[in-house]
Amino acid sequence: MLVLLVTGVPAAGKSTVAHKLSDWGHTSISLDDDNSTCSWPHPAGPLDTQPGRRNNSSSPPPLQRTWNPDRLDDVISTARHDGVQTLWLCGKATNASELRNRFDACLLLEIDQTTMRRRLTDVEQSGVCRANDSLATAMASYQAFVATWRRLGAVPVDGTQDPDQVCQDLLMAAAFAALGRHR
């Protein structure tokens, strides 16, 4: 089984890609939407659910999500057991680079800061909750995030394109990853 991570800065299109790939018949999971995989470190201990979805929290939401390694392993193991050929895992977490050995390839949805700012602002104005993705935090962490994933060898994919084209490019990158694995 080929296990692919699709990551990117906030508003790069990770969840959109996960849903579109799923609509096209691929096995894809938006890890950022999976509360059993995600947690948000908080001074009082990890939150069970996404900030902004808790009704009993009076403190501001923490700004960085992490993935539970055991839960991630369970997701991968279940897909393998179910005979999945290619598993697309889409999302962003502060510990994702530490978990990269679980993935056959990492694909980086690249968008520029102007696009990120526009997309985050559009989302904020529409009233959709983007917990973790405050504009100031996203802008401040942009350079380091992109530089880290480039240094780690993530395959860049232009995330500014139409989502259908982004998915086509991801499928092409996956085909190359599969070829490289069989050499």
Image (cartoon, rainbow, N blue to C red):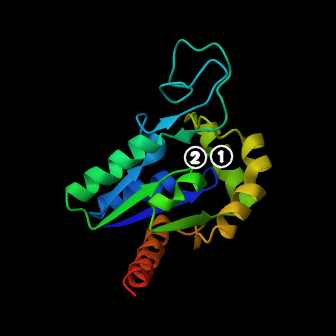
- Viewer-proximal residue, 90 or 53? 90
Structural distance between the alpha carbons of marks 2 and 1: 18 Å
Please name which of the two marks, 2 or 1, marks the residue nearer to the observer. 2
- Residue holding disc 2: 93
Residue 171 sits above or below residue 90 on the image: below
Crowding near the residue tagged with mark 1, few <14, some 14–19, many ≥20 C-alpha atoms within 10 Å? many
Q: Residue at x 68, y 54 (%)?
A: 116
Residue 100 sits above or below residue 56 on the image: below
Look at the image and tell me in which quarter the C terminus lies: bottom left
Q: Residue at x 63, y 17 (%)?
A: 44
Q: Residue at x 72, y 46 (%)?
A: 138
- Viewer-proximal residue, 124 or 6? 6
Residue 93 sits above or below residue 7 on the image: above
User: Is 85 left or right of 68, judged from the image as shown?
Assistant: left
Position of residue 161 measured from the top left corner of the image (x, y, whole percent): 56, 69
**Helix, strand or loop at disc 1?**
helix
Look at the image and tell me in which quarter the N terminus lies: bottom left
User: Is 53 left or right of 62, judged from the image as shown?
Assistant: left
- Specify whether residue 159 is in view: no
**Helix, strand or loop at disc 2?**
loop
Q: Residue at x 26, y 50 (%)?
A: 78
User: Is 141 left or right of 96, judged from the image as shown?
Assistant: right
- Residue holding disc 1: 120
Residue farthest bottom in this picture: 183
Residue type highlighted by circle 2:
Ala
What number is the disc on residue 162? none
Residue farthest left in this picture: 82
Residue type highlighted by circle 1:
Leu
Crowding near the residue tagged with mark 2, few <14, some 14–19, many ≥20 C-alpha atoms within 10 Å? many
Position of residue 133 measured from the top left corner of the image (x, y, whole percent): 65, 41
